[in-house]
Image: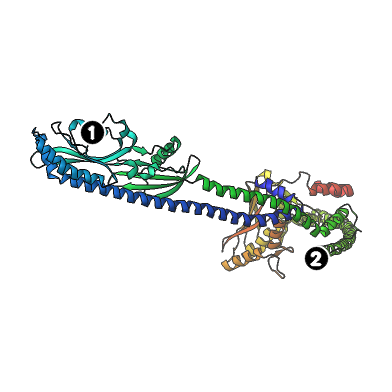
């Protein structure tokens, strides 16, 4: 995918590339700044409504606190009323009040309690319920047990405590009492002698305690969750909001964040959670800020659309300006096309004084130089051809030397000097291999034949004998390598490893394949090298150019020369590596790519040519 994109970009015209670059440089900062701006606007909107919901949460906390204070104070006042306890005790014991006692109780105690309830506008009612039906009901304060059974909370497993969201059904015939949901705190009334004798119901309206449940703001909705995980909603809240609230509670039941923002069902919501420890529940308030957030998105979309239109217009303008700026370049391109067709006499007319004009001038100079170089190349080709002719002439002259050597060889054989005859034969092979003009590589077989002839002559020169041990598979004999790659290594082994010892020694040559590489290892059982000599040799190999006046050369071609020729022919992964041990050996490994030479090598071809030129010489070689 990336490669295809690069190819597409590389195929675009220069003016289009410039236009794209300018647009990208312009659009990216504007896009980033616009993104940051509208993101900050969205965050500011969320913060603004979060602060508003925090304010509403404080209001709800204050309202709940005030309601709790009213209920607790009223309950404590009723619990401290001894006359009420006396009436309940007598009812518990089955005693009835006389008419006078009942009237006095109603005029004094009940009137005071009623006045207390009416003077507190937060209270819905405060009622006392006897555990028996023996008590005479004194409304709206004192009721018997049968009346209590009409209320929903009396059927709960635990009566005392808080009860929420029920209707006042103490008087079932008064249906209007079910217009308002109420909540209450139920408290036991206990006597020191008789124990549990009744209940106090201190009730307030749900709307009084939780006014946020009944707000008519369409973007806000709330619910209260009691200790039993029951949910209480206001009557005006929609089913959609109730479902969203249930989802919030399922996912954030144990959240400790008092105010947080989230997305739910495609809506943007600010959620506040108020834990009311006295109730053992939580008040959840939610504001739907989808509309304000969408207004920010609409502004962003308008801006993006405006930017797209502006960039489209800017694209046209930039493209026109760039084409004017590149006019000189287009002139140069047209002239270069003519040059590619072979019209070397064409020249570029300079129309501007900028870098493009300077480029046209430099190209004119380059064309002039190319014409000069072309002429020089023609002259050089003529010289190369003349050199090849001279090389052929040298080959022809070399045949005179070969014929002379053959005559000497025949004279030695006539005198039965066979050692001299063999030496002349080896010398002839060396001369043929050295003087043969080869433009490419040679086979390993040819290089080894040359080494064998070289060692024959070396053994004539010294009093000791140098043996050659070959450990190469026949399949490697056609391996292709540069000419004179191994002989300089063998010569170096003789001169620097074996000659100082002046005793019989062996040079081992073995080879093998490593994957796609061919490794030829040449080891001499000679004197080896010191550590300083080995380091100097390694540094010599690492030098870019063969230094002048070097001492480690063989027949004019040193180890460094061999290493450089292999790397020039096959690459930096190939060449010579060394190992040595003082007094034991020196080992040179030649690494070249696995490559088979043609079966009809250059030597075979030259032999055919030589046989055609001198048939007598060829017959003698066969004999």
Q: Residue at x 58, y 53 (%)?
A: 35
The location of residue 490, given as percent across then percent down, is 67, 58
Name the quadrant containing residue 415: bottom right
In the picture, measured across the screen, residue 20 lies left or right of residue 99, that is: right
Classify 210 as above or below 543.
above
Dot placed on the residue nearer the N-terminal end, 2 or 1: 1
Residue 521, given in percent of the width and then of the height, sits at 63, 53
Q: Residue furthest right?
A: 345
Give the residue number, with chain letter if any, for mark 1.
154
Q: Quadrant of residue 32?
A: bottom right
The local crowd at label 1, few if under 14, some if 14 to 19, many if 20 or more residues have their Cα within 10 Å, is: some
The quarter of the rendered structure image containing the N terminus is: top right
Q: Where residue 153 sits: x, y (%)? A: 25, 35
Report how far apart the C-alphas of labels 2 and 1 lie in the structure: 99 Å
User: Where 376 sits versus 90, above or below?
Assistant: below
Q: Where is mark 2, residue-wise?
A: 354
User: Which dot, 2 or 1, sits closer to the camera?
Assistant: 1
Examine the rendering and report whether any part of residue 444 can be seen: no
Along the viewing direction, whichever of 353 and 56 lies nearer the viewer: 56
Q: Is residue 334 left or right of residue 260?
A: right
Q: Which residue is rendered at x = 69% and y = 55% of the image? A: 23
Lateral position of residue 453 relative to residue 137, left or right = right
């Amino acid at each position: 995918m990336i490669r295809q994109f690069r190819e597409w970009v590389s195929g675009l015209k220069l003016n289009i590339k410039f236009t794209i670059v300018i647009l990208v440089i312009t659009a990216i900062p504007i896009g980033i700044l616009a993104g940051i701006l509208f993101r900050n606007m969205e965050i500011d909107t969320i913060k603004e409504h979060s602060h508003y919901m925090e304010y509403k949460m404080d209001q709800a906390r204050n309202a709940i606190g005030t309601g709790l204070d009213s209920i607790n104070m009223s309950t404590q006042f009723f619990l401290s009323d001894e006359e009420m306890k006396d009436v309940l005790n007598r009812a518990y014991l089955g005693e009835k009040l006389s008419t006078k006692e009942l009237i006095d109780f109603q005029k004094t105690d009940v009137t005071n309690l009623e006045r207390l309830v009416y003077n507190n506008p937060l209270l819905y009612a405060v009622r006392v319920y006897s555990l028996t039906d023996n008590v005479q009901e004194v409304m709206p304060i004192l009721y018997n047990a049968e009346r209590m059974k009409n209320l929903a909370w009396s059927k709960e497993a635990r009566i005392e405590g808080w009860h929420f969201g029920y209707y006042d059904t103490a008087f079932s015939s008064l249906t209007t009492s079910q217009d308002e949901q109420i909540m209450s705190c139920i408290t036991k009334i206990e006597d020191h002698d008789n124990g549990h004798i009744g209940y106090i119901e201190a009730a307030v309206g749900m709307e009084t305690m939780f006014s946020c449940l009944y707000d008519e703001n369409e973007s806000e909705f709330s619910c209260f969750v009691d200790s039993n995980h029951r949910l209480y909603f206001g009557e005006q809240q929609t089913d959609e909001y109730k479902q969203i609230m249930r989802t919030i509670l399922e996912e954030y039941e144990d959240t400790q964040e008092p105010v947080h923002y989230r997305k739910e069902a495609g809506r943007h919501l600010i959620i506040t959670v108020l834990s009311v420890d006295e109730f053992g529940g939580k008040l959840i308030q939610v504001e739907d800020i989808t509309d304000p957030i969408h207004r920010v998105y609409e502004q962003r979309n308008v801006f993006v659309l405006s930017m797209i239109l502006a960039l489209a217009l800017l694209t046209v303008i930039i493209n026109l300006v760039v084409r004017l700026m590149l006019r000189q370049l287009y002139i140069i391109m047209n002239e270069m096309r003519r040059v590619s067709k072979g019209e070397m006499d064409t020249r570029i007319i300079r129309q501007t004084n900028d870098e493009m004009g300077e480029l046209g001038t430099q190209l004119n100079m380059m064309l002039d130089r190319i014409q000069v170089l072309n002429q020089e190349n023609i002259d050089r080709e003529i010289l190369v051809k003349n050199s090849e002719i001279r090389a052929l002439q040298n080959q022809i002259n070399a045949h005179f030397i070969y014929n002379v050597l053959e005559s000497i060889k025949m004279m030695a054989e006539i005198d039965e000097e066979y050692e001299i005859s063999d030496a002349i034969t080896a010398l002839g092979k060396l001369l043929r291999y050295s003087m043969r003009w080869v433009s490419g590589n040679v086979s390993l077989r040819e290089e080894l034949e040359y080494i064998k002839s070289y060692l024959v002559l070396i053994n004539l020169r010294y009093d000791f004998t140098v043996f050659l041990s070959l450990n190469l598979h026949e399949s490697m004999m056609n391996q292709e390598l540069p000419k004179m790659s191994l002989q300089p290594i063998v010569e170096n082994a003789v001169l620097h490893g074996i000659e100082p010892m002046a005793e019989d020694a062996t040079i081992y040559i073995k080879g093998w394949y490593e994957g796609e590489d061919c490794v030829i290892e040449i080891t001499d059982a000679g004197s080896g090298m010191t550590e300083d000599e080995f380091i100097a040799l390694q540094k010599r190999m690492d030098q870019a150019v063969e230094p002048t006046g070097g001492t480690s050369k063989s027949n004019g071609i040193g180890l460094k020369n061999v290493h450089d020729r292999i790397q020039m022919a096959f690459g930096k992964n190939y060449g010579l590596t060394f190992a040595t041990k003082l007094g034991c050996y020196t080992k040179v490994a030649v690494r070249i790519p696995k490559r088979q030479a043609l079966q009809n090598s250059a030597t075979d071809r030259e032999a055919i040519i030589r046989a055609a030129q001198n048939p007598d010489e060829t017959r003698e070689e066969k004999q």
